[in-house]
Amino acid sequence: MKSKETLGLTAGALLLAVSLLIPSLLAGVVTLPIGPFTATPTSHVPTLLSVLLGPTTAGIVGLGSALGFFMRLGPLVGMRAAMHIPVGMIGAWLVRKGVSFPLSLLAIAPVHAGLEALIVLAFGFSLRDAGMVVGVGTLVHHAVDSAIAILIWRVVYLRTPLADLGKR
């Protein structure tokens, strides 16, 4: 295995571990609940960073997030977190196509919000709760976590050999 592949595998495994740890340690403790919407600080950051490592890694990290939230906060939040799987994979695809990381995060924000809003409709919540509470709440949460991910990307990622991995 080449050193860049090893580095990518290691980075992906660490992001997966963090995506499982955040709900285990923070969910319910520092979570902001508003109806069917919950915001756990930094919960999107591992998925957002994983888009730099490719669609498969992003999907796996999103799955870790979903499992962590499902175990800690139940099926509604777990299913909302499962939307991190397609969101991360779409973001990774955009990065692979040459879209900058910050612009990719901006592009997937409405997809993220829309998918999470659709999930709560399936659980019987009103259109108002889905759109105004979950949709808008997810957009704000995504923006805050995107800012954190971009900061980490600028400080750490761009200064390592990982910078070339997402472009495979």
Image: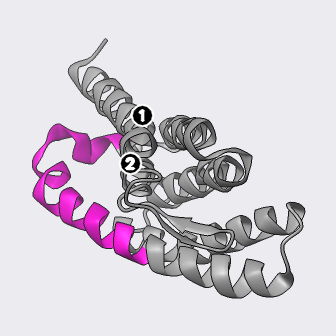
Name above or below for residue 145 compared with residue 74.
below
At x 54%, y 53%, the residue is 88
Mark 2 and mark 1 lie on one chain; the one further toward the N terminus is: 1
Q: Tell me if 123 is positioned left or right of 50 in this view.
A: right
Q: Which mark is residue 16?
A: 1
**Does the stretch in magenta take in 147?**
yes
Disc 1 crowd rating (10 Å Cα; few below 14, some 14-19, many 20+) is many
Which kind of residue does numbered mark 2 sit on?
Pro
Q: Quadrant of residue 137?
A: bottom right
**Which region is colored magenta?**
143-165
Identify the residue position indicated by label 2 in the image: 46
Where residue 32 sits: x, y (%)? 47, 69
Where residue 69 sits: x, y (%)? 56, 44
- Asked if marks 2 and 1 touch (Cβ < 8 Å), the reply is yes
At x 73%, y 72%, the residue is 117
Name above or below for residue 8 compared with residue 138.
above
Image quarter (top left, top right, bottom left or bottom right) of the C terminus: top left
Q: Secondary structure at mark 1?
A: helix
At x 38%, y 49%, the residue is 26
Name above or below for residue 50 compared with residue 32.
above
Which kind of residue does numbered mark 1 sit on?
Leu
**Front-lying residue, 51 or 123:** 123
**Front-lying residue, 74 or 41:** 74
At x 28%, y 20%, the residue is 6
**Does the stretch in magenta take in 84?**
no
Which secondary structure type mostly characterizes the magenta part of the structure?
helix
Image quarter (top left, top right, bottom left or bottom right) of the N terminus: top left
Q: Which mark is residue 74?
A: none
Q: Tell me if 159 is positioned left or right of 23 in this view.
A: left
Q: Secondary structure at mark 2?
A: helix
